[in-house]
Image (cartoon, grey):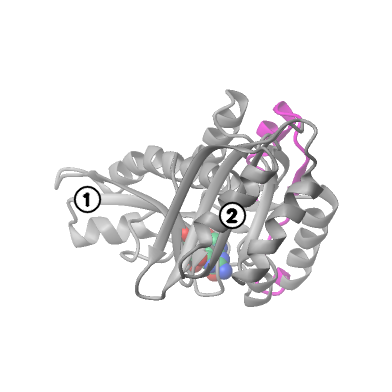
Amino acid sequence: MFDNSFVFTLSCEDRPGIVSAVTTELFKIGANIAESNQFWDRQTNQFFMRIAFTCPPSVTYEEIERALAQPSQHFGMTTKLINGARKPKILIMVSKFDHAMLHLLYQIKVGWLGAEVVAIVSNHDDSRATAELNGIPYYLLPVKAETKRVQEAKLLEIIEQSGAELVVLARYMQVLSDDLSRILSGRVINIHHSFLPSFKGAKPYHQAYDRGVKLIGATAHYVTADLDEGPIIEQETQRVTHAMSADDLLATGRDIESRVLARAVKNHVESRVLLNGRKTVVFSS
Ligand SMILES: Nc1nc2c(c(=O)[nH]1)N[C@@H](CN(C=O)c1ccc(C(=O)N[C@@H](CCC(=O)O)C(=O)O)cc1)CN2
């Protein structure tokens, strides 16, 4: 679906005149700004901006690109221009726990999350029925240490063939290789079931229980080769008590994980997340 709403994001070295230059070009092509956010990182002197705007139906994507090319080159910007109504294709990866995946599918069904799930990939068969019920292609790719390279090559083929622009690890419990993490850099979002940087690894709820924390949480982050170290997009916490078992913490965490991942994916597909070195700038709605 294509309409006359667009989102333009930029980042560049900060200096006077960036906002004026961009908005002047938009004014010249008859654009109307619907939402504008910006941030100046004083430590790195990097400037970030997101502008959502509409254009007269007669104005084409290429004409907008040409208009914004002048300030983009002048200020040495990294930019992205997307059509606001387009639904990015996402591929969901899951292992045994399906709560975060089901929440994403529900939020897409009710229209809160503007995306299209083009495939579900898993190292277990547990979610095949869900995929079939939703008419989504399902790929079973069991992973062992000796088969990881071959299975990851198959995953890349599925991503290529399906046209997936974003891979969402919705409690997928295998570590992606350094090569795959680099190939898919900026295109993989993982939900980690703890309030990072606390309790990295596969069993954070057991670590939290043993430590006796009074808060648990979840963290959505971009995946890098460094396990649980990628740029954080979204987090949430909830109070817990001494009376709760590790399984109680796990049960409490399910809803937190689901909300946090859905918010992170929504912000990503709406071009509200810009990378800022090892961190992110998030222009939430
Ligand atoms: N390159 C990356 N891959 C993945 C990341 C990441 O940050 N970078 N996050 C994980 C998800 N995750 C925590 O959020 C996680 C998953 C699995 C493990 C782990 O130690 N897995 C063991 C196998 C466990 C099992 O089979 O149940 C392993 O892979 O040897 C740690 C953290 C997803 N991938």
Residue occupied by mark 1: 215
Q: Secondary structure at mark 2?
A: helix
Q: Residue at x 41, y 76 (%)?
A: 44
Can residue 39 be seen by looking at this rendering?
yes
Q: Residue at x 60, y 63 (%)?
A: 186
In the displayed structure, would residue 26 be above or below residue 146?
above
Binning the other alpha carbons within 10 Å of mark 2 as few (below 14), some (14 to 19) or many (20 upward) gives some
Q: Disc 1 to disc 2, how far (Cα)?
A: 44 Å
Q: Position of residue 234 (x, y in %)?
A: 41, 51
In this view of the protein, which residue sits in the foreground, 82 or 129? 82
Camera-near label (1 vs 2) is: 2
Residue occupied by mark 2: 22
Q: Which mark is residue 89?
A: none
Instruction: Confirm if mark 2 falls within 8 A of ligand 1.
Output: no
Q: Amino acid at mark 1?
A: Leu
Q: Position of residue 18 (x, y in %)?
A: 52, 61
Indicate yes or no whether the magenta region holds residue 136.
yes
Q: Please give left or right for residue 160 compared with residue 127 in the image.
A: right
Quadrant where the C terminus sits is: top left
In the displayed structure, would residue 97 be above or below residue 144?
above
Q: Position of residue 206 (x, y in %)?
A: 31, 57
Q: Residue at x 62, y 34 (%)?
A: 114
Query: Please, which residue is most extreme toward the left here?
Result: 242
Q: Residue at x 60, y 33 (%)?
A: 105
Q: Earlier in the sequence, mark 1 or mark 2?
A: 2
Quadrant where the N terminus sits is: top right
Q: Please give left or right for residue 148 compared with residue 233 in the image.
A: right
Which residue range is magenta in the image?
123-148
Image mark count: 2
Indicate yes or no whether the magenta region holds residue 150.
no
- Magenta: predominant secondary structure element? loop
Snapshot quadrant of residue 102: top right
